[in-house]
Image (cartoon, rainbow, N blue to C red):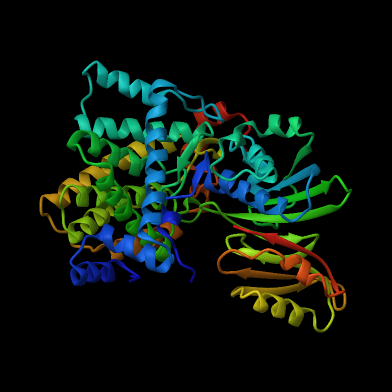
Amino acid sequence: MSFISVFDVLGPNMVGPSSSHTAGAVAIANVAHKLLAPPLKKVDFTLYGSFAKTYHGHGTDRALLGGIMGFSTDDLCIRDSFRIANERGLAFSFTPNETETDIHPNTVDIRMENADGQVMTVRGESLGGGKMHIVRINGVHVDFSGEYASVVVVQQDKPGVVAHITKVLSDRNVNIAFMRLFREGKGDTAYSIIESDGILPDGIPEQLKTNPHIHDVMIVQP
Amino acid sequence: MDFKNANELLALCRQEGCPISEIMRRRECILGETTPDTVKRRMAKALSIMRSSATIPLENPGRSMGGLIGGEAKHLAAHAGKKKDICGPVLQKAITYAMAVLEVNASMGLIVAAPTAGSSGVVPGLLLALQEHYHISDDRLLDGLFNAGAIGYLAMRNATVAGAVGGCQAEVGVAAAMAASAAVELMGGTPEECLGAASTVLMNMLGLVCDPVGGLVEYPCQNRNAAGVANALVAAEIALSGIRQLIPFDEMLAVMYQVGRHIPAELRETALGGCAVTPSACQRCGHCG
């Protein structure tokens, strides 16, 4: 069982009204925005379950949009995120999907497109109390919370890649808390997600990318 | 320096000769791998947000996102201003502040979840009212928050604080148990009396359902935060008078969790039962079902 801090009880400090529908939504989108190189040009949110039913009254839409612009759960700018997104030239849309029911009740799919035309999709589930986890990246099932400093590696499913990743991290004295590997299929694109203690040092993406089978590396600091 | 239940917490308090707040503070430093200064600064920040959210609506009421609430705290303050209040000063202020926090929360203002957003008015409501009436220092009020944190931690660890899992008794019920325990410590009670008060609250709020109109954290949530404060004050008074409880906190927490899981899904935050499906609620929110 992970440590329950007194600030998990008296916290998060958040813009209301709901820890699951507002703070959790900010947290999901905030992690998602760290996964694609800026600047973001367009974002589409598909809302499921209770998110789809009550997103307006809970400000889930403003929360998601705020999170995707990098706001934290206690940033009052969340209230004005529509206006701020318009000023920044960020196009956005919200689509409730109430037909898909075999899904966690507070789920969102986020489709992001940056100025270079790169597209990424991320699915997040809000678990209550402001906690959430990311469960899909580009359709591949993954699982991480963004609470730890995380390295997300997009790689080809080939022998030796994971050894390279752990060697680089070990050389930089990074202590791995959790490490998981997810793949589309044997030999296909795979995702390594490493959650570590403390803050990650600079330069890790560059060192990891020296392996030709590593396509991309994203760093998500808490 | 960790404890898995109230029994172990009390043993630690005896062993170390210190109150619940101090045990919780030390636990945070050790397990959170941080310093007393950092922990104090973070808690002081939480207190400052709590104070703003409890007082802003007295001057500047805000309409909620869903349009179901707004302006209640100002009404309560005006009522007290005319000396027409019947609760007595501590409870009157406490319910005013508690309802104010929910008003801020529902209008997308800044609050501290305690332990959840929907129950965020109870702990600040009671603590700030006690502070004013008894001239308690801010440092001392932080002790109250650490004490409250210990109770909330036990509820998160051994039961639930999610309305969707355990009903309102798990949200406002736990918040009130936290507030009661904190109040007892602030007013000079022992750790045993703190947990006695927390146990009493869970007993008195046992079975309370979560039935928000329109599925929104507005109504009856705001009223129930006021009721939570009252329950906390009643339980603290009982404990401070030296009355002992037959059922200890750990057992009451287990019972709360068990009862919560027996509450039908319609009455656990789904807005499919209770207040949410009354004719007046359905007429008001329009898009039910």
In this orientation, which residue lies closer to the viewer: B191 or B166? B191
Side (left or right) of B132 relative to B257: left
Side (left or right) of A136 relative to B210: right
Task: Decide: is A117 above or below A183.
Answer: above
Which quadrant of the view contains residue A136? bottom right
Task: Decide: is A157 above or below B54.
Answer: below
Q: Position of residue B125 (x, y in %)?
A: 32, 38
In this orientation, which residue lies closer to the viewer: A170 or B86? A170
Number of callouts: 0
In this orientation, which residue lies closer to the viewer: B116 or B262? B116
Side (left or right) of A54 relative to A101: left
Q: Position of residue B251 (x, y in %)?
A: 29, 65
Q: Residue furthest top?
A: B82
- Name the quarter where the C terminus of chain B is drawn: top right
Q: Position of residue B56 (x, y in %)?
A: 41, 27
- Name the quarter where the N terminus of chain B is drawn: bottom left
Q: Residue furthest left?
A: B242
Residue at (69%, 32%) from the top-left corner?
Answer: A84
Task: Decide: is A84 above or below A140.
Answer: above
Q: Position of residue B233 (x, y in %)?
A: 23, 43
Q: Is residue A120 visible?
A: yes
Residue at (49%, 24%) from the top-left corner?
Answer: B62
Q: Is residue B204 visible?
A: no
